[in-house]
Amino acid sequence: MENTGGCMCGKTRYKVTGEPVGGVFYCHCNDCKRQAGSAFTIGAGFLAEHFVFEDDSHVKTYVTVGDTGTNMDRVFCGNCGSPMFSKTSLIPGVLYVKAGSLDDASWVEPPVEIYTKDKLKCAEIPSDITRFEALMPME
């Protein structure tokens, strides 16, 4: 499996190969919500040795401390702020690519949610709501 991805402005691009390891999940922790600016984030674990930036000149890292007391490196594009991945020493050699940064995330189907204690009520998406494939009609 090969995946490519990048940031909103296009200055930070990457390629990651291999099958996901370490899980594919929804994360509801407060730090991930703040980083994503959303109700949750979706991470997919890959071996760090299989991840490469095309150009890392705009890559920045912000370090937070998780509830375990260990550092969480949050890697993002320093030009537009788009998150690329997170990694922690709790799971050495694995980084968690942000699904929203993948060029094609159609294969992503997380079977797990973590930090549900911090989950927002609105993060439940009822199956019976009205849905639009694109922007809803402006009437």
Image (spheres, rainbow, N blue to C red):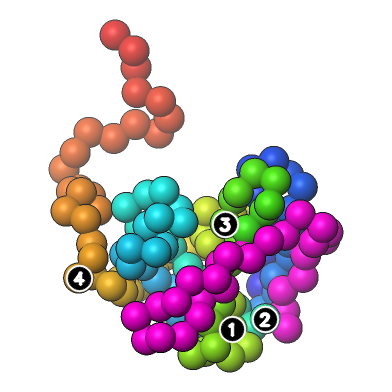
Name the amino acid type tagged 2: Ala
- Where disc 4 sits, the SS reads helix
Q: Could you tell me how far apart the alpha carbons at marks 4 and 3 are, in whole angstroms?
A: 23 Å
x and y, in percent, of residue 12 in the image:
74, 53
Residue 117 is marked as: 4
Residue 48 is marked as: 2
Query: Which segment did they paint magenta?
Result: 49-75
From the viewer's side, name the closer residue of 61 and 122: 61
- Where disc 2 sits, the SS reads helix
Q: Could you tell me how far apart the alpha carbons at marks 4 and 2 are, in whole angstroms?
A: 29 Å
Name the amino acid type tagged 3: Pro
Label 2 crowd (10 A; few <14 / some 14-19 / many >=20):
some
Residue at 56 percent of width and 77 percent of height: 87
Q: Nearer the viewer, mark 3 or mark 1?
A: 3
Residue 109 shows in the view = yes
x and y, in percent, of residue 60 in the image:
68, 61
- Where disc 3 sits, the SS reads strand
x and y, in percent, of residue 119 in the image:
23, 62
Q: Earlier in the sequence, mark 4 or mark 1?
A: 1
The residue at which mark 3 appears reads as 83
Q: Earlier in the sequence, mark 4 or mark 2?
A: 2
Q: Could you tell me how far apart the alpha carbons at marks 3 and 2 are, in whole angstroms?
A: 16 Å
Label 4 crowd (10 A; few <14 / some 14-19 / many >=20):
few
Left or right, residue 101 beside residue 17: left
Name the amino acid type tagged 4: Lys
Q: Could you tell me how far apart the alpha carbons at marks 2 and 1 are, in whole angstroms?
A: 5 Å
Left or right, residue 118 beside residue 83: left
